[in-house]
Amino acid sequence: MPAGHPPEDAARARRGGPAPAVSGGEDDALDGETPGRVPPRTARALWWGSAGLVLAVLGTSVLVAGADDGPRSAVAAALVLAQVLALRWQVRAPIAVLAADAVTGLAVWALLPAVTLTGALLAAQITLCVLSATRPRRLSARALAAMCLPAPLAFAAGGPTGLTVYLLTVVLAWTAGQWRGAQRARTRAETRRAVVEERARIAREVHDVVAHTLSVMVIQAGAADHVFTERPEQARQALRAIETSARSALGELRLLLRAFRPDEGEEAGEPRQPVPSLARLDELADTVRATGMTVRLHREGATEGLPAAVDLAAYRIVQEALTNTLRHAAGADEVSVRVTAEEECVTVRVVDNGRTPSGGSGAAGAGRGLMGMNERARLVGGSLRAGPLPGGGFEVAARLPVERAS
């Protein structure tokens, strides 16, 4: 971790796995999954997995049990296919799918009693698990109670063993859904907490910038008042400097209002770190080089006159990307940092030559560094993308508009 920077920078840095991009613009993307909502890709994967399981288990059972009864076997097979098709909507409408799978499952069991009731209602149990994971507990508990209603049939067909197996599988399906729902809730809470922490840091830093600007304005106003009569031209220069500083402060305050207020419990005498900026990139690069990493730093354009919020955001993005390289880029020994300052925007690109771990990080809190960088870019009206490169290595690229903070 680069020396002289807050320890939470590195603590919140994560590689974020193989996701191809992290882009700014939507709060929902930062706050994680909405309760009850499953990403389309996950929903499709869930359907394929559920359909394969039902076809492999129940489909095979129907073929074996109905081998000597062609007509009944054909009807039962059609009902199994209906269950598989209904599973396509188990995420969108789990209650309706649960009812349909339960009815068709009971019909399969009535046609072929050799198929156990537990096996015939496999699709309904899978849907109960999904419902338990994505819907309120009160609703899923009612669904669990409804799934227990056929228990007497299980007892009549298989005795105490059949009843025990049926109730156990139904309760396990519901419990698995509850566990998954709790896991998703923890992930959402962790993601939201990471965003709140990052916004609080941004608020403190912008607060320092604005306070400095206002202090300069006070000094300039005092100087203008002192020389107003004897040296009016110098007074005018001071007033123009006040106007420029005030416009800059207003821009910073607009960004400050987008973040959270500084912690009220902060000690008044707590020492402050110097405000980071792109002018200190050489210091940052030197601290990374001290670890043995080769850092190639390229600058294009002038960064001295940038709005403080944009300057700070660009620096923090570079810092977070370098921290990610040190902590998560397996085998990386070189990283390239390119900062281009143009009239309308500042672009930042950090590329390393490491290997991204396959499968990503599934641990809680993974990807916080990327979320923090994304939040930095979003609050100044910019965008950020991050992900592994086809030829190897990991790239972080940000575009920060200058006019937004002016």
Image: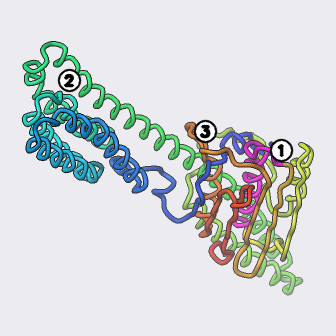
Which residue: 56% across, 49% down? 195
Left or right relative to 108: residue 343: right
Q: Of the residues under marks 3 and 2, which one precedes in the sequence?
A: 2
Kind of residue at badge 1: Gly
Q: Nearer the viewer, residue 381 or 253?
A: 381
Judge depth for marks 3 and 2 and give the one in front: 2
The N terminus: image quadrant: top right
Query: Which element carries disc 1, helix, strand or loop?
Result: loop
Judge depth for marks 2 and 1 and give the one in front: 2
Could you say which quadrant of the image residue 290 lies in? top right
The residue indicated by pointer 1 is: 4
Kind of residue at badge 2: Tyr
Which residue: 70% across, 60% down? 389
Residue 138 appears in the picture as rendered: no
Q: Which mark is residue 265?
A: 3
Specify start and end residues of the magenta stretch as a single range: 308-332
Tally the numbered discs: 3
Query: Which element carries disc 3, helix, strand or loop?
Result: loop
State the scheme by which the image is colored.
Answer: rainbow
Q: Is the C-beta separation of discs 1 and 3 under 8 Å? A: no
Q: Is 62 placed above or below 247 here?
A: above
Label 3 crowd bin: few (<14), some (14–19), many (20+), radius 10 Å:
few
Label 2 crowd bin: few (<14), some (14–19), many (20+), radius 10 Å:
many
Query: Which element carries disc 2, helix, strand or loop?
Result: helix
Q: Of the residues under marks 1 and 3, which one precedes in the sequence?
A: 1
